[in-house]
Image: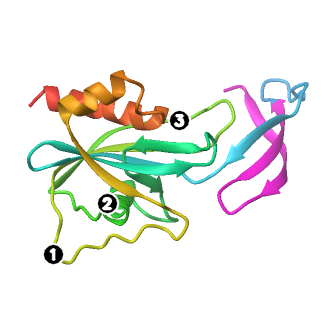
Amino acid sequence: MDWSIEHKKILAQTPVFQLEEVSLIQNADRKPVALPYYRIHTRSWVNVFALTKDSKAILVRQPRVGMMQMTLEVPGGGIDTDEDPAAAAARELEEETGYRAGSLEFVGVVSPNPAIMTNRLHMFLARDCYMPPDRQHFPDLTERIEVRTLSLAELDATIKEGGIHNALAALTILMSRRFLLND
C-alpha cells in the first residue's frame, strides 16, 4: 500500500471499539491524501463451527442490538490480549455452549470489513464436541444465549430459508464445510 498514517485521532472510545479519524500521506511523494478516513479499531474475533460426535451443529441463538432481533449463529467472540486464536476458540465454545472440542482445526482468517475495520476473524472447525462433566458454561453477563443443535440437513435448510443472519457466521459454516467434504 502506498499510504502511511500521518496522524490518528480517537473520536470515540467504548468498551468494545474505538472510532478513529486517520490522516494519510502517500509514501512516494509524502503528499497528504485529500480526505481524512474513519476506521473502527477493535480486537480480533474467533468463530467456531462446532459439531457433536453425532455430527449435529452446535449453534447459539441470541439477541443482537444492531438488527434488534434474535439471531442464530456459530459460537464466537473476542480474542483476549496475548491470547492465541485457537485458545480463544476453545474458550468461547465452552463459555457460550458448555461444549468442549474433541479436535479443533484452523479454517481460515478474513478481514470482516477492511474498508473501515482493523480487526480479523479467525475461523475454526471443532469436531467431536462433548458436554464435559465439569461443564464451564459461563456466558458474559450481557449475553442471553440459547444453545441449539441441528443436524447438517436442518442447518442447510435453515441457511436456505435465511435463518442465519450473521454473514460471518455463515462464512464460517461455509468455509468449515469444505473440510467436511474432504473427509
Mark 3, secondary structure of its residue? loop
Kind of residue at badge 2: Thr
Residue 47 in the image: above or below residue 170: below
Residue 11 in the image: above or below residue 96: above
* Whole-percent x, y for residue 176 in the image: 27, 34
Kind of residue at badge 1: Pro
Q: Quadrant of residue 130?
A: bottom left
What residue would you read off at disc 2? 97
Q: Quadrant of the C terminus?
A: top left
Tally the numbered discs: 3
Q: Which mark is residue 111?
A: 3
Few, some or many C-alpha atoms within 10 Å of disc 1 (few <14, some 14-19, many ≥20)?
Answer: few
- Say left or right for 153 vs 10: left
Bounds of the magenta segment: 1-25
User: Is 22 one of the magenta-colored residues?
Assistant: yes
**Does residue 39 appear in the picture of this structure?**
yes
Residue 87 in the image: above or below residue 26: below
Kind of residue at badge 3: Ser
Our reading of the magenta stretch's main secondary structure is: strand
